[in-house]
Amino acid sequence: MTVKTGRRWNHNIHYHPRILDAVPDGARRALDVGCGEGMLARELRRTVPGVTGIDLDATSIDQARGHPDDVEFILGDFLTHPFEPASFDVVASVATLHHLDAATGLARMRDLLRPGGVLAVVGLARSTMPNDLPRDLAGVAVGTLHRAVKGLWHHPSPIVWPPPATYAQMRALATEVLPGSEYRRHLLFRYSIIWRKPQG
């Protein structure tokens, strides 16, 4: 199905504003982890002068590099790429943590942030039945309405399903790795984590 509104839509894109609204004033450098074909990175570039996207999928990076912008796109593994520690004001990630060990990924993102920088994550987790059934049914209904109006864009990146961790496990992990972080569970089968790295 093609997008009917002229703007791409899917469950991940729906929560891009959650990340964009968390960008701190005066941010100079941003990193998009698991950037795919670069949509979020390009959105970050509207307010952040220096944006880097990194992804392991060559097809996605080729598409990202095909856009006429000055975002730097790297084909590689953000866990091992030689980024300088504490070198970004923003580290963002959408639908990436479930592709790797989430604790390792969150710790690496944390370490790449400058003091005062913001980590903003939108992720997928696994529902726990039967407790999550009412929420999931509501999510299906709302998602169907969105698709009817906006269409559904399918990203080119690899898919991992089901996610290995539950929502409760991701909440606990965020509390452990990022003390003071804000964890929210969202209706359209996503959660978000927002964390500001302490100064000093």
Image (cartoon, rainbow, N blue to C red):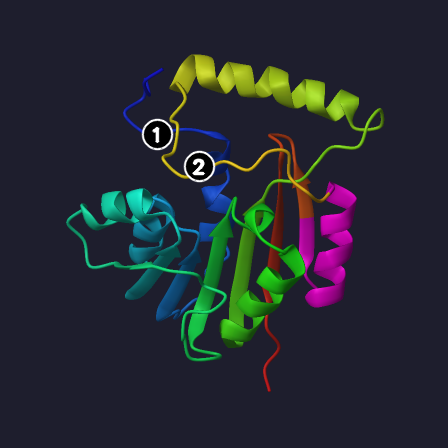
Residue range in magenta is 166-183
- From this view, report whether residue 197 is shown above or below residue 200: above
Image quarter of the C terminus: bottom right
Residue 85 horizontal side relative to residue 98, left or right: left
| Residue 118 painted magenta | no
The residue shown at (75%, 61%) is: 175
For label 2, the crowd category at 10 Å Cα-Cα, with few meaning under 14, some 14 to 19 and many 20 or more, is: some
Is any atom of residue 24 visible in this view? no
Is any atom of residue 86 visible in this view? yes
Q: Nearer the viewer, residue 152 or 181?
A: 152
* Coordinates of residue 37 in the picture (x, y in percent): 32, 44
Local SS, label 1: loop
| Residue 172 painted magenta | yes
Label 1: which residue?
A: 8
Q: Amino acid at mark 1?
A: Arg
For the residues labelled 1 and 2, the Cα–Cα distance comes to: 8 Å
Q: Which mark is residue 13?
A: 2
Local SS, label 2: helix
Image quarter of the N terminus: top left
Q: Which mark is residue 82?
A: none
Q: Earlier in the sequence, mark 1 or mark 2?
A: 1
Q: Amino acid at mark 2?
A: Ile
For label 1, the crowd category at 10 Å Cα-Cα, with few meaning under 14, some 14 to 19 and many 20 or more, is: some
Q: Nearer the viewer, residue 77 or 197?
A: 77
For this orientation, the residue located farthest to the right is 130
Q: Are marks 1 and 2 in contact (CB under 8 Å)?
A: yes
* Coordinates of residue 12 in the picture (x, y in percent): 49, 37
* Coordinates of residue 138 in the picture (x, y in percent): 68, 20
The residue shown at (50%, 66%) is: 79
* Coordinates of residue 197 in the picture (x, y in percent): 59, 73
Q: Nearer the viewer, residue 170 or 200?
A: 170
For this orientation, the residue located farthest to the left is 68
